[in-house]
Image (cartoon, rainbow, N blue to C red):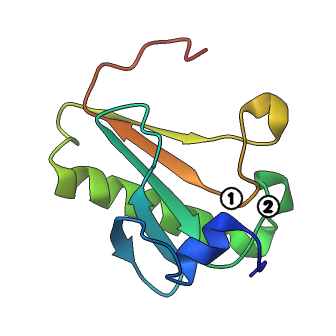
Amino acid sequence: MTQDCIFCRVARGETDSEVLHQDEHVVAFRDIAPQAPHHVLIIPRRHIATLDELGPEDAPLAGHMIHTAARLARDLGVAGEGYRLVFNCNRHGGQTVFHLHLHLLAGRPMHWPPG
């Protein structure tokens, strides 16, 4: 983990984040600047800056992140109405924190294209 990375600090339990799920691989917590009534971030505990850094050996981790998001959507009661999962990659892709994270957005209609 990187000492000054905010998401590494979240993964280590050093922030006041509202954690909804954690296991040996990922931590899920509410976004501090939500873009929907339910906005949860799912991060790996291991520091990975972007999707570009994932290797073939990380396929189980990526799958676990998606599976965790789907389970959280069910737990939050939003799976039936629908939700959106988003990975942003690098600056033009909208990534602002360079620690891999998956957004779970729900609780309002999602429009296409997203912007």
* Up/down of 78 relative to 26, above or below: above
Look at the numbered discs 1 and 2 and tell me whether their residues touch, using CB distance below 8 Å. Answer: yes
The disc label shown at residue 49, or none: 2
Near-viewer residue (79 or 12): 12
* Up/down of 33 relative to 13, above or below: above
Query: What residue does disc 1 label?
Result: 100
The image shows residue 99 at horizontal and vertical percentages of 71, 61
Say what secondary structure mark 2 lies in.
loop
- Is tag 1's residue or tag 2's residue first in the polypeptide sequence? 2
Residue at horizontal 76 percent and vertical 67 percent from the top = 48
Of the 4 image quadrants, the one containing the C terminus is top right
Say what secondary structure mark 1 lies in.
loop
| Residue lying at the far bottom of the rendered structure | 24
Q: What amino acid is labelled 1 in the image?
A: Leu
The image shows residue 35 at horizontal and vertical percentages of 43, 31
Of the 4 image quadrants, the one containing the N terminus is bottom right
The image shows residue 51 at horizontal and vertical percentages of 76, 53
Near-viewer residue (59 or 70): 70
Near-viewer residue (51 or 21): 21
Q: Residues within 10 Å of mark 2 (few under 14, many from 20)?
A: some
The answer, for residue 6, to whether it is visible in the render is yes
Q: Residues within 10 Å of mark 1 (few under 14, many from 20)?
A: many
The disc label shown at residue 70, or none: none
